[in-house]
Amino acid sequence: MTYRPPNTADDDVTERFLSYRELLFSVVYNMLGSVIDTEDVLQEVWLAWAARHRDPEAAPVRNPRSYLVRAAANQALARRVELSRRQETYIGPWLPEPLVRAEDDAAGSAERRETLSTAVLVVLETLSPLERAVFVLHDVFGFDHAEIATILDRSPAAVRQLATRARRHLHGRRPRRTTEPEVHAEVTERFAAAVLGGDLQALLAVLAPEVTLWTDSGGRGPAVELRPVHGRDEVARVFMTVAATLPAGGVDVRYRWVADDPCALVFSGGVPFGAVVVDLDAGNRIAAIYSITNPDKLSGIH
């Protein structure tokens, strides 16, 4: 989905907003893990930004970057409440909506370069909304505690406490990426080839003994299991079942990138019905598999 604000007579207002759009997108997406909700937040921020500049009595915005980040972060916190309510009734595991790079975007645009990996976004779901906001603003984007205090309308001491709690909570849970991207991509392709070919031995060879599979179907897409599946043999069993039930007309697998993660996109009849990202252990075996089949989360993939 490409975001474009409505037409406005004030081109300067529009240009200033667009100059910060990629930053705003990345901040909000890392806070929410949802492309659709991120676009909605950006629309609200744009409308507020444009309305302020139409108000003759409004004070001038002296620091557009700080103003827009503050507006976006607080809109994201409000949207996080709604998103959390939806997750309470969500069927099966909830995974972040994949933010897939365009095929011609080899290096990754600015918002993609600052997007956290799928594994880290999953871990961030265990933080409170404010802890997550502070972590994203400080650890990902480098805002200092005083700036974050202004953005979130908290004291610097409160922000430091939130940052400490977030880091303490994430310690030991946050994946440490050491694998070269080329190796990660190769293992992803070997995994997909083994599944699609129904090759059990090849599949077992790329899975770590303690591998875990999460499948996000939202109760709408295909899902063999609605709970996380643990262990190499059990995960292999699930994927052998998948291989036996693939569409009769066959599938088309395309390899793209979600942030800095290689991703296998599975299409049938030109329509995406699966996005799979794997996380590797220190031995370059698959330690975690994130499979998204909810059509709502795949609608922006082409």
Image (tube, grey):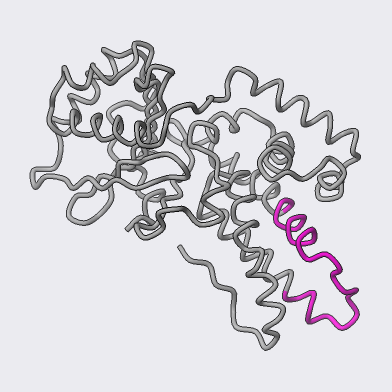
Residue at image position (16%, 45%) is: 251
Residue at image position (58%, 20%) is: 173
Q: Position of residue 218 (x, y in %)?
A: 40, 39
Magenta stretch mostly in which secondary structure? helix
Residue at image position (74%, 39%) is: 134
Q: Position of residue 280 (x, y in %)?
A: 40, 24
- Number of numbered callouts drawn: 0
Instruction: Classify 15 as above or below 234.
Output: below
- Left or right: residue 63 versus residue 41 is right
- Left or right: residue 141 versus residue 52 is left
Q: Position of residue 56 (x, y in %)?
A: 87, 83
* Residues in magenta, as a range: 50-74
Instruction: Classify 291 as above or below 72.
Output: above
Q: Position of residue 149 (x, y in %)?
A: 86, 44
- Left or right: residue 76 versus residue 216 is right
- Residue extending furthest toward the bottom: 9
Quadrant location of the C terminus in the rendered image = bottom left
Closer to us: 110 or 91: 110
Quadrant location of the N terminus in the rendered image = bottom left
Image quarter of residue 75? bottom right
- Indicate whether residue 139 is drawn in magenta: no
- Residue extending furthest toward the left: 248
Residue at image position (35%, 36%) is: 182
